[in-house]
Image (cartoon, helix red, strand yellow):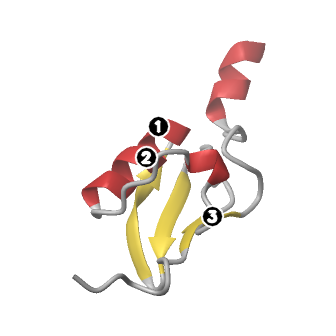
Amino acid sequence: MAHPTEHPHVVVHAPALDGSRRVTEGDETLGIATHVDDVSEILRLADLYVTDISESGFIEWQGGGPDDWPGLSEHHEEA
C-alpha cells in the first residue's frame, strides 16, 4: 500500500461575526464549526482522522487557535 507523501492542507478560518469558523481543504469547504469538537467531527466525516487537533501540523488556524471561539456567546454572558 502506497503512503501519501503530503498531508492535506486544512484551514480553520478566522471567526465570523457569530463566532463560527469555516473549515476548508484547498478550495473545498468541509463544514462550519462553532467549537473545536466540531472541527474534529468535520475532519472525521472527510476521512481526515486527527488525534490532536491543536497539535496537528497540517491544520492552519487563522484568526486564533483552537481555543479561540469569540462571537455571540460573549454577548450572552454580558447580558
Judged left or right of residue 2, residue 50 is right
Furthest-front residue in this view: 1
Which one is in front in this view, the residue at disc 1 or the one at disc 3?
1
Q: Under tag 3, what secondary structure? A: loop
Q: Nearer the viewer, mark 2 or mark 3?
A: 2
Three-letter amino acid code at disc 2?
Answer: Ser
State the residue in front, 45 or 5: 5
Q: CA distance from mark 1 to mark 3?
A: 15 Å
Tell me what residue is drawn at x 31 percent, y 53 percent: 44
**Distance between the Cα atoms at labels 2 and 3?**
15 Å
| Residue 8 horizontal side relative to residue 18, left or right | left
The residue identified by callout 3 is 13
Q: Which residue is mark 1?
A: 37
Tell me which amino acid carries mark 1. Answer: Asp
Q: Is 49 placed left or right of 63 in the picture? A: left
Q: Quadrant of residue 14?
A: bottom right
Residue 51 numbered mark, or none: none
**Which element type, helix, strand or loop, lies under badge 2?**
helix
Q: Residues within 10 Å of mark 2 (few under 14, many from 20)?
A: some
Say if 31 sits above or below 58 in the image.
above
Q: CA distance from mark 1 to mark 2?
A: 5 Å
Q: Is residue 30 visible?
A: yes
Q: Which residue is mark 2?
A: 40
Q: Is residue 17 visible?
A: no
CB-based contact (under 8 Å), mark 2 and mark 3 = no
- Residue 74 position in % (x across, y down): 72, 26
Quick check: marks 1 and 2 in contact, CB under 8 Å? yes
Helix, strand or loop at mark 1: helix
